[in-house]
Image: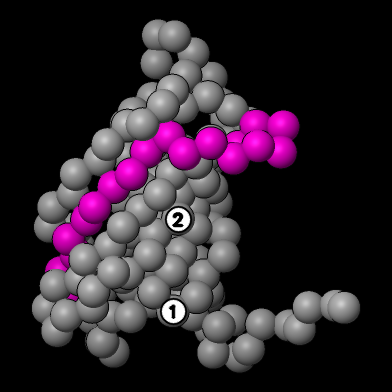
């Protein structure tokens, strides 16, 4: 059975989040790519590059944290009120296993949406030869702020 095309609302939401990623200098510098997007959920992918490693050749924790922060922020942004954007207020990340593989995938999921603050959980996986290994877990607090032009 063929999958149905994304709804107009889902496509518009993805376009909105893609525009945010495109404006992020750090995400562009790292080579991050947007994956699936739906209400309250966003995926960010990071292909391996030697430029993203630490001294042992593993993905650097800074790169892991950066894509986790982006995935969580994008997930919160999918539910932000009209005329608002989001900023990270706080996050805690647990590094669960060495980050090694062909790429990383960060999956942000809104846990609780509030009027001002949103709580997000982000799971980060290393992808290698078709296997998906959990390598980090982030809990994040996001604030909705009025949007202004960059």
Residue 27 seen anywhere in this rendered image of the structure: no
Tell me which residue sits at (32%, 32%) in the image: 95
**Which range is magenta?**
127-150
Q: Where does the image place residue 74, in percent across and percent down from the top left?
A: 37, 65
* Res 137 → quadrant: top left
Tell me which residue sits at (52%, 70%) in the image: 37
Between 106 and 34, the one nearer to me in the picture: 106
Q: Is residue 137 left or right of residue 33?
A: left
What is the total number of numbered labels drawn onto the structure image?
Answer: 2
Between 52 and 112, the one nearer to me in the picture: 112
Q: Is residue 116 left or right of residue 22?
A: left
Q: Where does the image place residue 107, in percent across and percent down from the top left?
A: 45, 55
Which type of secondary structure does the marked residue at label 1 adopt? loop
Q: Quadrant of the C terminus?
A: bottom left
Image position of 49 with respect to 93: above or below? above
Q: How is the image coloured?
A: one colour
Q: Where does the image place residue 117, in percent across and percent down from the top left?
A: 14, 72
Q: Is residue 97 magenta?
A: no
Residue corresponding to mark 2: 107
Secondary structure that dominates the magenta span: strand
Q: Residue furthest top?
A: 55
Residue corresponding to mark 1: 39
Q: Count neighbours of disc 1 (C-alpha within 10 A) and say few if under 14, some if 14 to 19, many if 20 or more.
A: some
* Res 75 → quadrant: bottom left
Tell me which residue sits at (66%, 82%) in the image: 6
Image position of 116 with respect to 47: above or below? below
Q: Where does the image place residue 53, in percent across and percent down from the top left?
A: 45, 20
Image position of 51 with respect to 77: above or below? above
Q: Quadrant of the N terminus?
A: bottom right
Which type of secondary structure does the marked residue at label 2 adopt? strand
Q: CA distance from mark 2 to mark 1?
A: 13 Å
């Amino acid at each position: 059975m063929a999958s149905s095309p994304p709804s107009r609302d889902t496509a518009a939401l993805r376009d909105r989040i893609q525009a945010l990623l495109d404006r992020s200098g750090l995400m562009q510098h790292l080579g991050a790519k947007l994956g699936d997007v739906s209400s309250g959920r966003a995926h960010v992918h990071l292909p391996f590059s030697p430029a993203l490693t630490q001294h042992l050749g593993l993905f650097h924790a800074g790169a892991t944290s950066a894509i986790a922060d982006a995935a969580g922020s994008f997930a919160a942004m999918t539910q932000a009120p009209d005329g608002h954007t989001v900023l990270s207020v706080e996050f805690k990340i647990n590094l669960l296993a060495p980050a090694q593989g062909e790429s990383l995938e960060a999956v942000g999921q809104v846990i609780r949406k509030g009027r001002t603050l949103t709580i997000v959980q982000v799971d980060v996986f290393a992808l290698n030869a078709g296997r998906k290994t959990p390598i980090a877990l982030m809990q994040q607090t996001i604030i909705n702020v009025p949007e202004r032009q960059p």
